[in-house]
Image (cartoon, rainbow, N blue to C red):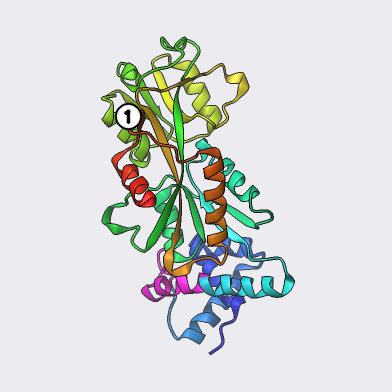
């Protein structure tokens, strides 16, 4: 049996949205035409791919077919690229968007020359891990940490950057005039977490390690919302990567943290059983850029990392 990639794309798009109307809009077709494509594919495979009662969800057969369907589409794109000379694109999902992950990716890719990237926004590491396992993306970039229940089994990661973080406070914060702060100096302050704290592994581990018991979290409504909150609450601070841009007009103070200096670990992640043809090239770009910019500098007596990041650093250096 020969698979029609148009039918496969109809399936993966519908599986990604779990909504026939939105999938049809994304594919620029009618919902009726999309339903016919899905029905034709199910007929060819002799299985039901979706349950259509009380909403839409994948059947067990659909769950099994989804990773292979993504791989079939990727193989088709590589075949076209091979004859067109354009080279295959790399789908990369990033997360931790307030911390501007693409600025690091851009620096590494720039050293390689023309590499076609297709960036995608990931909600968080668990959602990107799922996309990698299901073939919905080729590469993930952000802060990787262990997921409960072995939900990251089958994925490989490479630590590529350790970035110092600053304490960021509003102009009227009691510590706003400091040239530098120790993490212990923040114990009487309130840590503002720009998302649900259960989703922010680094901030949670930092607060636990340094005895910061006052914590607030809220929805991630973007950088402007973060700025407004810090300016309006003189008890709050947050952590922000030292090289990430803050609005010039905000009046915030970014104060270096020392003794120890916390480091934010950026990693690449991928599914080992579905390595992209350009993965080794990308890894070389991150390695060369990281070496020239000293992205992986770490001194135990000077710096602080969560235990899970210690393990990654030891594994990569080994």
Residue occupying the point 55% across, 38% down: 293
Residue occupying the point 36% across, 25% down: 191
Using the image, determine if residue 59 lies above or below residue 98: below
Give coordinates of residue 282: x percent, y percent.
56, 56
The residue segment tinted magenta is 50-70
Give coordinates of residue 130: x percent, y percent.
41, 59
Q: Residue furthest right?
A: 84
Q: Is residue 171 left or right of residue 260?
A: right
Residue 263 visible in the snapshot: yes
| Closer-to-camera residue (182/44) | 182
| Closer-to-camera residue (49/229) | 229
Give coordinates of residue 59: x percent, y percent.
39, 72
Quadrant position of residue 74 = bottom right
The residue under label 1 is 301
Using the image, determine if residue 5 lies above or below residue 245: below
Using the image, determine if residue 143 lies above or below residue 272: above
Q: Is residue 45 left or right of residue 91?
A: left
Query: Helix, strand, or loop for circle 1?
Result: loop
| Closer-to-camera residue (111/276) | 111
Residue occupying the point 40% across, 36% down: 298
Q: Is residue 67 magenta?
A: yes
Give coordinates of residue 31: x percent, y percent.
60, 68
Residue 56 visible in the snapshot: no
């Amino acid at each position: 049996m020969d698979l029609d990639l148009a039918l496969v794309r109809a399936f993966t798009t519908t599986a990604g949205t779990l909504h026939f109307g939105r999938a049809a809009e994304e594919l620029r077709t009618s919902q009726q035409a999309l339903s016919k494509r899905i029905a034709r594919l199910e007929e060819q495979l002799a299985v039901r791919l979706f349950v259509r009662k009380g909403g839409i969800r994948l059947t067990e057969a659909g769950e099994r077919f989804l990773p292979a369907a993504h791989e079939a589409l990727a193989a088709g794109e590589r075949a076209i690229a091979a004859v067109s000379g354009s080279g295959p694109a790399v789908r990369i999902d990033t997360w931790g968007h307030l911390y501007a992950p693409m600025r690091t990716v851009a620096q590494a890719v720039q050293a390689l020359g023309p590499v076609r990237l297709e960036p995608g926004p990931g909600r968080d590491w668990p959602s990107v891990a799922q996309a990698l396992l299901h073939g919905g993306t080729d590469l993930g970039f952000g802060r990787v940490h262990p997921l409960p229940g072995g939900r990251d089994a089958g994925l490989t990661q490479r630590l590529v950057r350790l970035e110092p973080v600053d304490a960021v406070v509003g102009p009227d914060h009691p510590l706003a005039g400091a040239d530098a702060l120790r993490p212990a100096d923040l114990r009487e302050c309130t840590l503002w977490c720009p998302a649900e704290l259960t989703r922010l592994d680094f901030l949670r581990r930092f607060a636990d390690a340094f005895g910061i018991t006052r914590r607030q979290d809220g929805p991630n409504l973007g950088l402007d919302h973060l700025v407004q909150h810090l300016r309006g609450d003189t008890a709050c601070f947050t952590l922000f990567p030292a090289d990430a841009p803050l609005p010039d007009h905000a009046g915030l103070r970014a104060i270096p943290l020392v003794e120890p200096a916390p480091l934010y670990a950026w990693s690449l992640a991928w599914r080992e059983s579905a390595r992209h043809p350009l993965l080794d090239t990308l890894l070389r770009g991150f390695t060369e850029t990281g070496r020239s910019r000293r992205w992986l500098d770490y001194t135990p007596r000077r710096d602080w990392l969560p235990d899970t990041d210690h393990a990654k650093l030891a594994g990569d250096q080994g």
